[in-house]
Image: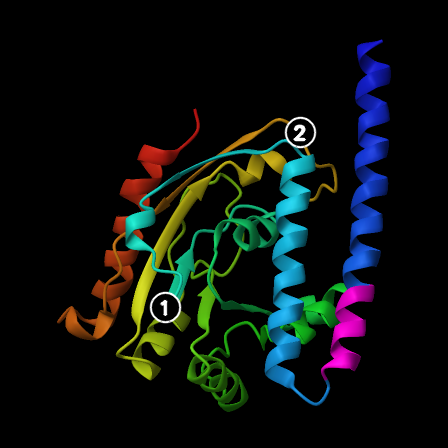
Amino acid sequence: MKVFITTAYYIFFGIITTAGVVIVISIVYALTMLFTFNKKLGRKASHFIAKLWGRITSEIAFLRVHIEGLENYDKNKLYIITANHQSAFDILFCLMILKGEFAFLAKDTLFNIPCFGFAMKCAGYISVKRGTIGALKSIDDMTNVMSNNISLLMYPEGTRSITGEIGKPKKGMLKLAERFPDVEILPVVFDGTRNVLKPKSLKVSLFKKANVRFLKPYKMSESGLTDNEKLDYWYNLMSSNYKEVKIN
């Protein structure tokens, strides 16, 4: 009986998730057509729908989330948000926990995924080729986003961590900090998403827990550190806090 109920729920979850994707894409497309004359309004509407999608998906997966350090996060303030990366579920997870306006920096290949890539473009997320975060077009897109008081969200490790442990950050974070020296870095560390959606799997595990901690923002331009020391600082900061939020 238990197996039957579990199987039935996964079938239900799959149907709801698929229907959600179709509905989200349809609404985003309609909004894009409706607000062609106003890109800012269209982007905000598309991002709102994406955030709603992230929350609903987490809710029907019965994901329990514990959040710390909200006093360090002002949703109305401009940040370069840097989070660790554990799972493909991180995108939906971040859409749920981050309340303010932000745009993802994402691999260009994600924008080639049918429907999903289209939705990302509509929401104003930024396509970046791996290793070319300093490319002129990417910089122009980022400048345009930040000029509208929209934060940037990136995963400095550059790829998902198989073990969940924090990986060494790539230099792309330094280029962003150099380009926007007056914008604070907001480190966000979490654990648990890797248990919701494991690598190379499309199966969403139910009734899991995730811990999140918003760390104190800081400006790299005021640190007085060398480039390598700046990367080490972020890595050590994230690693020490990860040990405290890690789900055993």
- Who's the residue at 23% across and 70% down the image? 220
Q: Which residue is mark 2?
A: 206
Left or right: residue 213 versus residue 192 is left
Image position of 189 with respect to 139: above or below:
above
- Who's the residue at 29% across and 62% down the image? 231
Q: Nearer the viewer, residue 35 or 235?
A: 35
Q: Amino acid at mark 2?
A: Leu
Q: Is residue 21 magenta?
A: no
- Who's the residue at 33% across and 35% down the image? 243
Name the mark on residue 13.
none
Coordinates of residue 48 in the picture (x, y in percent):
62, 63
Give the SS element for disc 1: strand
- Residue farthest top in this picture: 1
Which residues are drawn in magenta?
A: 26-35
Q: Quadrant of the N terminus?
A: top right
Classified by dominant secondary structure, the portion drawn in magenta counts as helix
Q: Nearer the viewer, residue 190 or 112?
A: 190
User: 10 Å neighbourhood of mark 2: few (<14), some, or many (≥20)?
Assistant: many
Left or right: residue 96 versus residue 28 is left
Q: Nearer the viewer, residue 31 or 140?
A: 31
Left or right: residue 72 versus residue 127 is left
Q: Which residue is mark 1?
A: 79
Coordinates of residue 38 in the picture (x, y in percent):
65, 86
Q: Amino acid at mark 1?
A: Tyr
Image position of 39 with respect to 242: above or below:
below
Q: Quadrant of the C terminus?
A: top left
- Who's the residue at 67% across and 45% down the image? 56
Q: Is residue 114 visible?
A: no
